Amino acid sequence: MPDLDRYHRQILLPGIGEAGQRRLLDSHALVVGCGALGTMIVDALARAGVGTLSIIDRDTVELTNLQRQVMFDEADVEQAMPKAEAAKSKIARINSQIVVHARVDDFNHRNAERHIKDVDVILDGLDNFETRYLLNDLAVKFGLPYIYGGAVATGGMSMPILPHPRKRASGIRSSVTWTQEQSTPCLRCVFPHAPPPGASQTCDTAGVLGSAAAVIAAHQVTQAIKLLTGNLDALDRSLLSIDVWANQTRRFDISGARSLSGCPCCAEGRFDFLDARAGSAAATLCGRNAVQITLPDEATEPVTLDLNTLAQRLCPHGSFTYNGYLLHGRFINETTSQGEPIELTLFPDGRAIVKGVTEPDAARSIYAKYIGA
């Protein structure tokens, strides 16, 4: 039996109590993205006693992350630790009573459904709208609560999504249930289209203040705790927008967004992002000066690379090491336009991040040259 003493101050809250705390301990939260928002979310959920956490992130820890990504330190940077694994390691020292699943993976339409088994709530730690729309498709299709959040520069937005009730598929066991009257518009009701390229700020062009991300993450976690403890009447049903530098807090009434929008997702039952049959095998990463390479869709057989052997093979071309999770290193003769060495991070499933290039073709060329076509 878990020791409830550590949650004493939380149990004192009228909306939680011992019964609510036990519900938290029986809950499973999926956090997609382990950057500024994601690290703060998993830290707070672990301390609150959410019994199972699944963390999905494709990336490794870098020095510039430490300004705002609270679960990481300089040792993680030196070891090029996968963010999900680094977060899992820290949580084990925060709360050893809970279960943490670290999934070093690129979350996409090919693997999304297998990540939601036994999940009670989905929390958004992402930095792009395409993947958020994928989370929204999952939430609507399978009847799962989804807590949207985004932060850039000195502000951000957050809102909880309780999709209009649909029949849940087998294997979806979320403890959070709601009525038609308690449902909310989905993400595509409120934002029918993603901002076009160049139309919105990114962490690369505008930066990000850690405290702004902390405020948004706190709102997301609070809504998740309300849902998991059965306090649906306390849910913030507005779209919250905060700018901590300009001292602005706004709430937008979005209750009519679904009926006004004719939403293709929750009104028409189309899941354009989840049902996608093709995706780019190379994608430029936001704010990273890097390109991610993934295996093409036709590669149906599971791939597990021998990264230790590959690290030895690459040694004549630079400095490469295998840390038990991934291969990472820098090339000697492959440099950026500024003369800096190009970096390669390679994962067991064949996925790679090529840092120092922004053109997919250049990244594919390096991958083919050193790893194989």
Image (cartoon, rainbow, N blue to C red):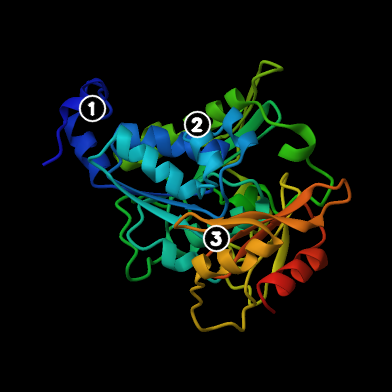
Give whichever of 263, 82 is nearer the camera. Answer: 82
Asked if the residue under mark 3 is in contact with the one under mark 2, i.e. CB atoms within 8 Å, the reply is: no
Residue 197 screen position, x and y as percent: 82, 51
Asked if the residue under mark 2 is in contact with the one under mark 1, i.e. CB atoms within 8 Å, the reply is: no
Asked if the residue under mark 1 is in contact with the one under mark 3, i.e. CB atoms within 8 Å, the reply is: no
Q: How many badges with numbers are in the image?
A: 3
Left or right of 81 in this view: 119: left
Tell me the kind of residue under disc 3.
Phe
User: Closer to the N terminus: mark 1 or mark 2?
Assistant: 1
Identify the disc placed on residue 107. Answer: 3
Left or right of 340 in this view: 347: left
Left or right of 45 in this view: 187: right
Location of mark 1 (residue):
7
Tell me the kind of residue under disc 2.
Val
Which residue is situated farthest in the front direction here?
316
Secondary structure, mark 1, is helix
Q: Residue at x 34, y 63 (%)?
A: 172
**Image: 281 above or below 42:** below
Which residue is situated farthest in the left direction here?
1
Residue 69 screen position, x and y as percent: 54, 34
Which residue is situated farthest in the right direction here?
337
The quadrant in which the N terminus is found is top left
Identify the disc placed on residue 70. Answer: 2
Secondary structure, mark 2, is loop
**Rendered image quadrant of residue 242:** top right
Tell me the kind of residue under disc 1.
Tyr
User: Closer to the N terminus: mark 3 or mark 1?
Assistant: 1
